[in-house]
């Protein structure tokens, strides 16, 4: 395990232990060591843990990007991801994945069984997953879509043509 991962695991364990320690204490206890009696000190301690965790995440992210950069050096041409194209493909994938839930929400909306749904908020929530992806993950997303499209193309081919391509005899016959 590399140093950045170890630092992140230690920071996460420390933050968890800190929060668990606060949760285990009775806020109404008169114990002089009760952290709930000094909220400013609790805030400082939590902030230190938060900063350590954020720093560890950033270090791991930089390490990951550095490794990705080294791997990309061997590639012929880096793939560029158009943000609008990525957004459209991502939203297509998300709406397909949650089609049943979205359809249930629509039906409840039409029947009046549920509170009105703010579509703008729903779209923002669905799109929020895009913000969690870095450029390497976005490129991987496009690559996986390209692989899926190639698989779909193969399904339309006769079985002998698929077998020929699998064996490396991708000869176009006109």
Image: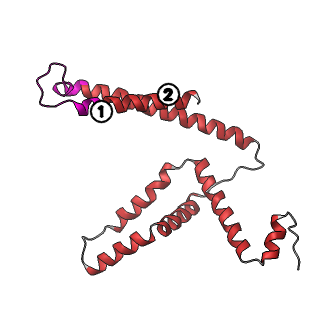
Q: Which residue is mark 1?
A: 20
Q: Residue 107 vs residue 171: left or right?
A: left
The range drawn in magenta is 19-41
Using the image as rendered, state which of residue 81 and residue 97 is in the foreground: 97
Residue depicted at x 59% and y 29% = 2
Quadrant, the C terminus: bottom right
- Mark 1 or 2: in front is 1
Mark linked to residue 131: none
Does residue 110 sit above or below 118 in this rendering?
Answer: below
Provide residue 82's location: percent of width, then percent of height. 60, 58
| Rendered location of residue 166, percent (x, y) | 80, 65
Left or right: residue 123 versus residue 63 is left
> Is residue 40 one of those drawn in magenta?
yes
Label 1 SS: helix
Confirm whether the magenta stretch covers residue 167: no
Image quadrant where residue 116 sits: bottom left
Report the number of discs: 2
The residue depicted at 40 percent of the width and 60 percent of the height is 124
Instruction: Name the mark on residue 7.
Output: 2
Count residues near mark 1 (Cα–Cα under 10 Å), then give few for <14, some for 14-19, many for 20+: few
Dot 1 or dot 2, earlier in sequence: 2
Front one among 11 and 127: 11
The CA span between labels 1 and 2 is: 20 Å
């Amino acid at each position: 395990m590399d140093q950045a991962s170890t630092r992140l695991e230690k920071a996460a364990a420390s933050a968890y232990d800190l929060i668990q320690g606060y949760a285990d204490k009775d806020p109404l206890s008169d114990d002089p060591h009760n952290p709930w009696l000094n909220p400013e000190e609790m805030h400082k301690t939590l902030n230190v843990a938060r900063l350590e965790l954020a720093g560890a995440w950033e270090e791991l992210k930089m390490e990951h990007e550095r490794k990705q950069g080294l791997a990309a050096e061997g590639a012929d041409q880096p793939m560029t991801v158009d943000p609008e194209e990525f957004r459209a493909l991502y939203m297509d994938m998300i709406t397909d994945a949650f089609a049943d839930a979205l359809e249930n929400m629509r039906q409840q909306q039409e029947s009046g069984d549920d509170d009105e749904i703010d579509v703008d908020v729903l779209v923002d929530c669905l799109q929020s997953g895009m913000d969690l992806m870095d450029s390497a993950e976005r490129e991987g997303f496009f690559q996986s879509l390209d692989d899926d499209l190639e698989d779909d193309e193969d399904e339309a081919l006769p079985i002998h043509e698929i077998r020929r391509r699998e064996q490396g005899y991708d000869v176009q016959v006109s």
